[in-house]
Image (spheres, rainbow, N blue to C red):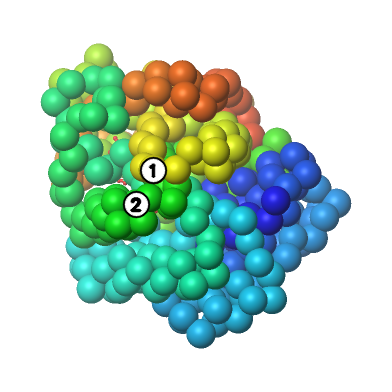
Amino acid sequence: MNVLLTGGTGYIGSHTCVRLIELGLRPVLLDNFANSKRAVLDRIERVTGVRPLFFEADIRDRRRLDEVLAVQPVDAVIHFAGLKAVGESVQRPLTYYDNNVHGTCVLLEALQAAEVRTMIFSSSATVYGDARTMPIVEDAPTEATNPYGRSKLMIEGILRDLAVAQPEWSITLLRYFNPVGAHPSGAMGEDPQGIPNNLVPFIAQVAVGRRDRLTVFGDDYPTPDGTGVRDYIHVLDLAEGHVAALQHGHRHPGVHVYNLGTGQGYSVLEVLRAFERVCGRELPYAVAPRRAGDVASCWADPERAGRELGWRAERSLDRMCEDVWRWQSANPTGYPE
Ligand code: NAD
Ligand code: WQD
């Protein structure tokens, strides 16, 4: 089975690529390197012994997509490509709607023409907005709190409309909670450009000496220790969730929606403590005011994915931190240029 991974050299795409190769499937990677580096391809080869097929392309470029799909026919698509920085999306909303929403429409047209009818889409727990009840089930109300989140909700809506118009499509919306972790080899991991927006990459950079201290955004939330609580999920568990979704999606047309999370929430300070255990020293932090747009708590009910896909996350928070630390200490400045 040939599987197109848009955004395939990105953080989640590259780890999913490794898992697909290990299972004997044939990933076909496509990326424009907007937020990833070519060296990722060398690392995938180092880890798996297989160099994946790769096409440099922008999902908004219809002609290029047609070319890729003609050279390399595929059976299904996992659509990771997108911009994902919440703060940047507030500053540059049109860039996000163009890249994420328009890009997805162009991709869908190219897939239609190539008669590809199975898509797994990278959605996000951000579509639940400030959810009232925890854990969050898939039928909870959705709401956008920023342009990034709105782009995900818009794409979910477009995909649902498409499945109504053309019932032969199989569309799976995977709503990821907080992906963290790295490949256990230490050769692959998350490589944010500039100052990390997310908690775990930031802590890892403090641990490796690239940043002085963690800023904890608020300690006055209605949570056990006052800091924000999230559902952190290992990127390899997430990768396995895509494999399960692919196998299921291929046999079941229609629209399927799954939370991919562990079902367990951890606070900012709990994550910091776990990372300290792993790197063997105390890490400095300072408490600052809340970050605009943050919610107090967010964790998944992953029961539906367990029941319908036979998938559940297995890796612990300590394991997530160990793998991140192995990657960060072996690659203090991330992937080479
Ligand atoms: P990432 O930035 O590492 O990967 C995305 C990849 O898409 C990058 O390699 C980038 O170069 C590529 N890309 C962006 N625009 C493109 C375009 N127009 N054409 C071709 N390639 C393009 O991000 P990630 O963490 O791997 O996230 C993958 C997907 O999962 C994204 O859609 C993201 O919104 C979604 N998601 C991520 C998280 C998270 O916290 N990491 C959480 C929920 C959902
Ligand atoms: C986690 C916790 C912060 C950084 C974001 C997106 C979401 C999804 C996943 C893509 C919060 C606190 C963080 C720091 C801190 N991405 N924090 N100091 O905000 O839950 O989710 O990534 O879809 O859409 O919004 O993740 O890692 O940024 O924050 O105290 O330097 O860590 O306040 O409580 P978040 P995060």
Whether label 1 touches label 2, CB < 8 Å: yes
Residue at image point 41% right, 71% down: 109
Q: Position of residue 29 (x, y in %)?
A: 63, 63
| Figure quadrant of the C terminus | bottom right
Q: Classify residue 199 as left or right of residue 251.
A: left
Q: Is residue 110 visible?
A: yes
Q: Looking at the image, which is closer to me, 75 or 259?
A: 75
Q: Where is residue 6 drawn, in percent x and y? A: 53, 62
Occupied quadrant, residue 91: bottom left
* Number of the label disc, if any, that sits on residue 254: 1
Residue 309 percent across, percent down from the top left: 51, 27
Q: 281 or 262: which is nearer to us?
A: 262
Residue 127, image x and y in percent? Answer: 25, 43
Ranked by sequence position, the earlier of labels 1 and 2 is 2
| Rendered view: 308 above or below 187 | above
The residue shown at (40%, 23%) is: 304
Is the residue marked by circle 1 packed among few (<14), some (14-19), or many (20+) residues within 10 Å? some
Give the residue type at disc 1: Gly
Residue 224 falls in image quadrant: top left
**Spatial separation of the CA atoms under disc 1 and disc 2:** 6 Å
Residue name at image x 39 percent, y 33 percent: 258
Q: Is residue 168 left or right of residue 239?
A: left
Asked where in the image residue 301 lies, by quadrant, the reply is: top left
Q: Residue furthest bottom?
A: 63
Q: Which residue is mark 2?
A: 163
State left or right for residue 109 relative to residue 1. Answer: left
Question: Looking at the image, which residue sits at the far top?
Answer: 224
- Dot 2 amino acid type: Ala
| Element marked by disc 1 | strand
